Each structure stands twice: as C-alpha cells, then as structure tokens.
Image: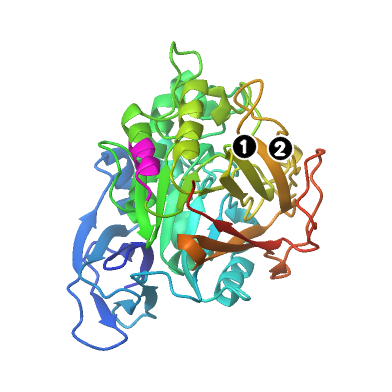
Amino acid sequence: MPVRIIPGAVSTDRLRALVIASGEAQPALTIEALQGGPAPALKIRAHAAGDSRIDQHIRKAGLSLWVCEAEGLRPGADYHLRAGSERPVHVKTFPAQLPKAGISLALASCYYEAFGRHKDYLQTLQSAPSYGPLAAKLLVGDNIYVDVGAAPGQARSGAEETVGRYLQYYWRSGYADVLSYLPTFCLWDDHELWNNYPEWQIHLARSMANARADYTAAALGSLKLFQSVLNPPPAARSGLSYRFDIPPVSCFALDLRAGRTVMKTASPRMTSEAKLVAFERWAADLQAPGIAMFGQPLWIARGNWMDFQPPDFSEEYTRIWRALTNAPYDVLVLSGDVHHSRLLELDTAKDRKVWELVSSPACMIPTMESIGAQAFDVQDKGILTFPLAYPGGPSGPPNLRAYHFGTEISNTVAFLKLAPADAGGIAVTTCFMDLTTKTIARNQRPRVAAPLAAPQPEWCQTTFVLKKRA
C-alpha cells in the first residue's frame, strides 16, 4: 500500500507528520530511535477536513489522510518514521541549546509545480553546501498555486479542483519528495486561495459572486487539511498563527492572509485582534533574539486593487512595527512572495535593528502572456525593488540602513545558519542558492538607489548578529 509521510513541525521533544495512504485502512507506521533505546509511542489518528465537499474528493482519489505524533523525545536526536517496508523518513529533534556549530534551516516561497524543478530543489536541500545537514524547511507562502495553471482533470467544483491541485503537489508529482524531506513549517499567502485574496479579481472567476463561496471554503479547508496541520498548535484561539522555539531563539509565524477582509470594509484587517495581540506579547516577552515569519514582506510599497500589501492595513502595520521596535532583542523577519530575494538591514530606533530576509521564488510562475494563452509554458522573472523610505507613512523610523545582497533568479531558496554569539547574541549566516546551478547566487544591484552595505559582496552570502538591545 503506497504511503507518503510528510514530516511537519519538530521541537526539542516532539514531532508530527501528515500521512497520505492509498486505501482506507490505517497505515502500519513505526518510529525508530536511531541512537538506540526503546521506540517512542507513536499516536496515529485519522485526519479529515470535516467538509464533505472536500473529504469526498480525497476518498474519490482512493486515498486517506492521517496524522502521527510522538512526544517525550530526546533533544537533538535522530528518528526514522517508516510505513511498512517503504524507505524511512528521517526526522531530527531540535537541540536543547544551539550548538557552537549552529543549526541550519531552509527558507522558501512561491513554488509553481508544473515546471518540474523538484529534482534540483531536492538535491539542493540534500547537499546544502556549507550549511548542511539542514534541520527544517520554512515554507512561507504561495507554497501551492491553486489559481494558476490548467485545472486538474475535469474539475466540476471548487473543492474538486483545489483538492486535485493539492494531491498533485503532495502525492502525484516529484515535489512530494521535497515535502517528505526535512520537517516542515508552513505559512501561506494569496495563491493558496487566489491572487490578492479576498479581493475580487476580474480575470479569476473563482473570486466572483457565483463561485466565490465555493472556492473560498475549498481553499481554506484544504489549507488546513494539508498545510496548517503540519504546524505547532495555534498561538491564538481559532487562528492559524503559531510559535515555536529553536532554543534560545523564539519564532512566531503571523498569518496575514487567511482571515484578511476586503479593503472596502469600514475597518479592513489582515489578521485578527487575537493573533495580533499574541504576536505583540511574543515580541515583548522575548528572552533571546527572535524570528518573525510573514507571508508578505514588511518592507514593501503600498499596493492597490491588484495586490494589497501590509502597509495598506495601516493600523495593524503600525502595531507590528511598534512590537518589533520595542522588543528587548533584535528580530529577523523572514518572508517571500515578491519574486525576488534580498537581505535588508533596518534601523527601528537607536541601536535597535530588524533584518528582513526574503526568499522568492523557489519556482517562478509562467509569464502573464503564457497564462493568458492557457499555455503555462514560459517562466517569468521578477524585479529586485523595494521602498527606500518607511512604507507606512511619510517618514521613518524604521529606516532602511543597507541593502546587503539579493537576486532576481527565478528558482532560488535561502539557507540560514543560527549559532551562538557573544553576550547572548545569535550569529546568522545566510545565503541564496540558485537551484539550477546548486551554487550560491551572484549578488545583483537592486533596481532602486538603495544604500549599499560596504563592501558589496560578489555572492549572496553574509553573517550578521542579532543582539540584546540596550
């Protein structure tokens, strides 16, 4: 019976995974502690959307979904999850404290499956030059394009089309091997629903009146079924934001999309009050440098009806920056979405820094002309640009201190290594990898007259330190 194990979040003492199995029977799953000792208890439960419109298409495909979890694990220990006689999936728990050599992560967003970059993607993760072995991958948005590409089969409903796309990514295609490699933490953005969700898009029938409710329910239900199930428990009631620790570093993933309202409402929101308050408390209570994850970059120009951005939601945007500014430690922001990759150094106040690392795209979507012709056969390319002044108002702070490096290549992921530094700081070494050459990408000048870090590197790689603030 074919089985696909997709490892999700890990911590110092637990792991979880999504399991996709052929047939209805519970798969025979086992866990093995590679350093020896008794095998931990493995809890397995059936997993469903709870929406018959979605669940029927899982069954129609001849599949069943399961979640497995194990607790009481040893920090920094290796485990194998196995289904019957199939090849095991390796999972390593986070260490109790960052080792001197550090711990490495992959950061990626915007993966369009139809161009078939999965082999390059997997090989790059497996080799991870100078950064391996990787501990986890952080997928921070547009991890699936449900609104771009030919509809799978003869889909007759939003649920059938959306489930079909997820099964293409998670079950049928080679990209499923990428998902099965390394523990995965997910965040999402508009293309998990539709471009600029929840706004109406004239070129997307799914956003219009007759189909809107059907596609919204299908997209949100499938997002929870396949993506958010991989994550730790929510940080706020009835929300999808979450936090996790790589001790002593604390991380918070703030969902700015699934609960977003249309801009024409009296008080438009990109997240709920409960989730925003949870984020503010997290930032205020940091006991070490933090990592904040968003589906869209914070340092980004205001948008419009075609693509609204965080600065368009001025009240919440201001509160996010205030929380980052008042935090007792420097914060690294991780994001994707914008179809270019770059590292920016931002001053929020005297001796208070926020670094923003954006990695996009892992595999670029087709050009607009190719999409319009329904060919989906020519890969697009992004433009490396960003605001020079604070996007949330007439002036900063925050202020853009320096552009360190970036690239416009159409297939890229970031690696980042976290290691202890002096005085409770965290040294971050990061780079952008070109998936096609499997080497560090060459640095490109941005398309704007940004202040450049000195000296400008030839390659997209550097080290900086997150510090305790005065």
Q: Nearer the viewer, residue 153 or 18?
A: 18
What colour-coding does the image apply?
A: rainbow
Magenta part of the chain? 278-286
Residue denoted by label 1: 299
| Distance of label 2 from label 1 (alpha carbons) | 7 Å
Q: Element at badge 1? A: loop
Q: Nearer the viewer, residue 29 or 341?
A: 341
Q: How many marks?
A: 2
Coordinates of residue 376 in the picture (x, y in percent): 68, 46
Q: Magenta: predominant secondary structure element? A: helix
Q: Amino acid at mark 2?
A: Phe
Coordinates of residue 422 in the picture (x, y in percent): 51, 65
Q: Nearer the viewer, residue 210 or 431?
A: 431
**Structural crowding at the residue carrying mark 1, measured as other residues with C-alpha within 10 Å and reported as few (<14), some (14–19) or many (≥20):** many
Q: Is residue 194 visible?
A: yes
Instruction: In the rendered view, tell whether residue 183 sits above or below residue 86.
Output: above
Q: Amino acid at mark 1?
A: Trp
Residue denoted by label 2: 386
Q: Is residue 221 left or right of residue 454?
A: left
Q: Magenta includes 232?
A: no
Please tell me which residue is depicted at 31% across the width and 77% down the height of the picture: 82
